[in-house]
Image: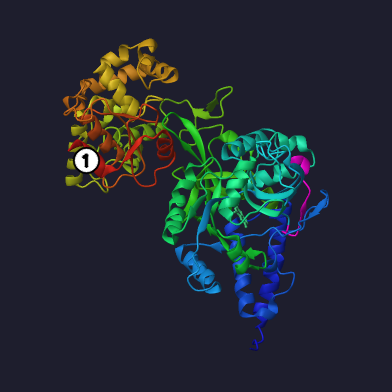
Amino acid sequence: MTEQLPPEALVSRAAQLREELRYHNHRYYTLDDPLISDAQYDALLNELRAIEADYPSLRTVDSPTQRVGSAPLSRFPKVQHPVPMLSLGNAFGPDDLNAWLERVQKLLPPNTPLSFVVEPKIDGLAVALTYSNGVLTVGATRGNGEIGEDVTANLRTVSNVPLRIPVSGATPPERLEVRGEVYLPIAAFEALNERQAAANDKVFANPRNAAAGSLRQLDSSITASRPLRFFAYAVGPFAGIELTSQWQTLQLLREYGFAVNPDARHFDDWQAVLDYCHAWMERRETLAYEVDGVVIKINDFELQEQLGVVGRDPRWAIAYKFPAREETTKLLDIGVNVGRTGKLIPFAVMEPVEIGGTIVQHASLHNADYVISRDIRIGDTVVVKRAGDVIPYVVGPIPAGRDGSEQPWRAPTLCPACGQPVERLPEEVDIYCVNADCPAQLVRTLEHWVSRGAMDIVGMGERQAQQFVEWGLVRTIPDLYRLTAADFAEREGYAEKRVENLLTAIAESKSRPLERVITALGIRGVGSVGAVDLARHFGSLDALAAAGEAELTAIEGIGPNTARSIVDFFATPANQQLLADLQALGVRSAADAAAQPLGTTLAGKTFVITGTLPDVSRDAARELIEANGGKVTGSVSQKTDYLLAGEAAGSKLSRAQQLGVAIIDWAQLQALIG
Ligand code: JCF
């Protein structure tokens, strides 16, 4: 078959892609300092692959599509891998996985029985450890798969890399090369970045880069100071042992003393493989380390041999890649919000970017210190992360992407809302507006007061809170209960009927149960769960206000900091005035009958609620549990009887699984109550 001459435009596009890919490849693999996200890199690579597939004559021997990885730095001795270290082809959904299985089946005799080994794909860097008569002699990075770097001294510092095998002391194999992934746990990555930022050192974009940067230190004492870990997942050349399958290999490696991923599974059934892959999409959040997909391998080594390898990708294995949770984009501006307590919170305004199916254009910058210590500048290309149910946040800048036009940010010295000077307490990373009359604080306080978990005033939200403060209608919370229809005369968007509904909703909120009033007060450390404990214990605001720290800390769930902040709250004259005004206006301050249990079906049972429930809010679920005599707490422990789990449940779910706590859904809860 003769190929048509490729159009000029494609010839030059292919050349351009190759050059860009080579550049980014070098930054990523050799310098551990990528300029673009993995997803962006993959998009470029896929575009080039597509062009080369249509016009094979454009496929040069040195095209990045023909080789994964890059040349090692010259500073470490090079190591030739006796058997090349493979990479993995990618699948991005069940269709890709099914297509892979079909290809495998086509290449094998009809009806060959297949079994699969599935394991989470660790986002670290691949290494090969050579053991001669049981002693670790050489440790090398993967490099380009053919030639890696000798980082033996550094690998020896990785605490769970065995220096001698087997652990049992039994006779070692004559020769064994163990392959696996070196990684940095997420908590260690975050702690490392904190330290790096504090020391004005480079902040790593992700745990993978941090692991690579740590392993490729010429000074191995630096490597030793980073808590790297290793998971073994394959073997290279070996002599003196017999291995016939991937599953058997994992068992042997574990016996020898290697860490093998506890979540590796062996399945005969393809549907079980697909289900397991799917389950990992959510479970990935629960691990202490970063996982970017799932690896699926044909178990039997003979079948692996028959299937063979194309380029660097084995036909007998595939990586099912999860949607990326990290992207790079441009930081357009840094805004500052004023919180309910007056805390100034910087946030990033960015060029919109899609992360895991959601368009993100705002992200947290945590606090002023974070922005300054990481030297995040307006105009920078930044790494943004969106994981699980946390608010997207900026991980850090990519300084190499700067062109000089970026503007360093300075922490505000005046409150952006009221213009009064801000304060910073020594030893604290946060800046506060301490003006008690700051309108932004009032808006936030009001917003919180009317919110669903607090006084639940329907028809009021952020916008109304903003307007009422702006129009001077509300200067304190009690003002809310002094509003009349006349206040809204002639105001756009406030027709007669709407005002009537709003005033009714405000009036109705006066009889909310005590725990909601306590929640609404917004005492630092007291959330809706703590408020229930306090309401149960004290029965009235007056009793709570009179409590001392000792009595408060004796209540389960109330720690010393919260106890202190409760006492401080009620000791503050402005708050005493607030409570007196509310009482005078008819906001109830005694325990409501509804707060007492209606039923006792759940008496003595402790629940934790997590995830998104169908049709009901978590607050409503909590009220239902409490109305039936049950107790709801915030975290899973030995004492938890049930975890009520909804969609996208995260770490609480895995903790409950670990502790063997019964996990129920909304329908099961209703069934329990009857
Ligand atoms: O966890 C991994 N990152 C991982 C990478 C696991 C594996 O079983 C792999 C791999 C890369 C290549 N297996 C191959 C063949």
Q: State the scheme by which the image is colored.
A: rainbow
Q: Is residue 652 above or below residue 560?
A: below
Q: Position of residue 664 (x, y in %)?
A: 30, 40
- On whether ligand 1 comes within 8 Å of the CB at mark 1, the answer is no
| Quarter placement of the N terminus | bottom right
On the image, the x and y values in percent for residue 465 come to 33, 38
Q: Please name whichever residue, 312 or 258, is drawn nearer the observer in this view of the structure.
A: 258
Q: Nearer the viewer, residue 559 or 442?
A: 559
Ligand number 1: quarter of image? bottom right
- The quadrant of the image that shows the C terminus is top left
Residue 56: x and y in percent read 66, 79
Q: Nearer the viewer, residue 664 or 244?
A: 244
Asked whether residue 55 appears in the rendered view, the answer is yes
Q: Amino acid at mark 1?
A: Gln
Find residue 360 and report its horizontal and vertical position in percent.
48, 52
Look at 56% across and 51% down and name the residue there.
Answer: 332
User: In the figure, residue 583 lies in which quadrant?
Assistant: top left
Residue 517, image quadrant:
top left
Residue 595 versus residue 674 in the image, above or below: above
Label 1 SS: helix
Instruction: Write down the region rendered in magenta.
Output: 144-154
* Residue of label 1: 670
Q: Mark 1, residues whose alpha carbon is within 10 Å: few (<14), some, or many (≥20)? A: few
Q: Is residue 305 magenta?
A: no
